[in-house]
Amino acid sequence: MPKGLSWQDRKAYLSIAKRLTKRGSGTRQGVLRERTQHYGVPNLVKYLADVSFVVVGGLATRLYMPERMTLDIDVLISRSRLPDAEKALRKAACRKLGPLTVGGSSWRLPDGASLDVLALSDPWVDFTLANPVHGEDGLPYVDLPSLVLMKLASGRVQDLADITRMLGGANKKDLRRTQEHVRKWRPQDTEDLDSMIRLGKLEYQDMR
């Protein structure tokens, strides 16, 4: 997984975004309100058996912002269940490609799709797995606050852009939940989160 931005580079990125973002730039085109699921996801339940998971990554963002093309399928599981997940994947004729540096492993599914199984032990993981958001395809997806936590931890430019756009379209309740999650689990990112909320709302022409 590519290394994220340094603290200094993140500050520089947010500073540039604040200067260049135009009020209502996406709302006028009507694109920011779209929620679609054009890119299909295999029935991951049959591959992971009884291992609890949620879909994360680029595919999960489409529940909270306009869908963007992504070729990756990422799921989150508890690190303690990684042996069970790998056993189930092998039994379903999936091929292991190798370990992930963040924890977990990468796989090739029988239909040729690639699957990254992120196995984390962070204290918020169990709660996230127990409280999924179900997509139109019936699969369990990560909720917005936990997705923001993961993208803050990754810290890549695309992840910061995703956070900004997702929070721009979030309602007050979800914004409050996300802020509470970040204050609890990643307090060092609270100031940056507030900046991304302001940028997102600016794009939506909604500063409330």
Image (spheres, rainbow, N blue to C red):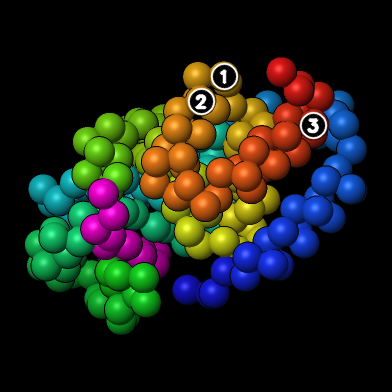
- Write down the region rendered in magenta: 109-123
The three-letter amino acid code for the residue at tag 3 is: Leu
Relative image position of residue 197 (x, y in whole percent)? 66, 35
Residue annotated with mark 1: 172
Sequence-wise, the earlier of marks 3 and 1 is 1
Separation of residues labelled 3 and 2 (CA atoms): 18 Å
Separation of residues labelled 1 and 2 (CA atoms): 6 Å
Residue 112 within the magenta-colored segment of the rendering: yes
In the rendered image, is residue 99 in sight? Answer: yes
Direction from residue 44 to residue 154 in the image, left or right: right
Nearer to me, 41 or 122: 122
Nearer to me, 25 or 59: 25
For label 2, the SS is helix
Residue annotated with mark 3: 202
Relative image position of residue 53 (x, y in whole percent)? 25, 48
Nearer to me, 42 or 123: 123
* Residue at image point 75% right, 38% down: 199
